[in-house]
Amino acid sequence: MPYLFTVLLLRPDYLADAFGQDTYTAFVAVDADDPAQACLVAQREVIAKDCSQDDALHTDPEDYFPLFVCPGHVQNLAGGVLSMSESASTQPSPSQT
């Protein structure tokens, strides 16, 4: 039975459009309940998407830093559609709670 994971990776600065904000979410299935294996599968997946075949051979998977790993396939509800200021303005004030 495959184990499902959600992995959020930070793209390296040399590839990122906006460093610190350029992430990749992978939904992976691995043979063991092993978050490290899930990270490696996700890192290889994003390298295949980001790099040409020649560049992929010379790209270190560890350049893609894992920010978050959890069991199951988890959907990010923010989806990158809110800026930080918009996100803060949509939070209820203490008087609204």
Image (spheres, rainbow, N blue to C red):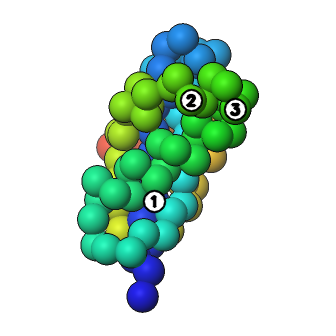
Front-most of residues 48 and 91: 48
Marked residue nearer the N-terminal end (1 or 2): 1
The residue indicated by pointer 1 is 6
- Residue for point 54% across, 53% down: 26
Q: Which mark is residue 53?
A: 3
Q: Residue furthest bottom?
A: 1
Looking at the image, which residue is at 43% across and 28% down?
A: 60
Residue to which mark 2 is pinned: 57
Q: Quadrant of the C terminus?
A: bottom left
Q: Is residue 81 visible?
A: no
- Residue 2 in the image, given as x and y percentages of width and height: 44, 80
Q: CA distance from mark 2 to mark 3?
A: 7 Å
Q: Quadrant of residue 32?
A: bottom left
**Could you tell me how far apart the alpha carbons at marks 1 and 2 are, in whole angstroms?**
25 Å
Three-letter code, disc 2: Leu
Of label 3 and label 1, which has the lower sequence position? 1
Q: Quadrant of residue 57?
A: top right
Q: Is residue 62 visible?
A: yes
Look at label 1 and name its amino acid.
Answer: Thr
How many numbered discs sit on the rendered protein?
3
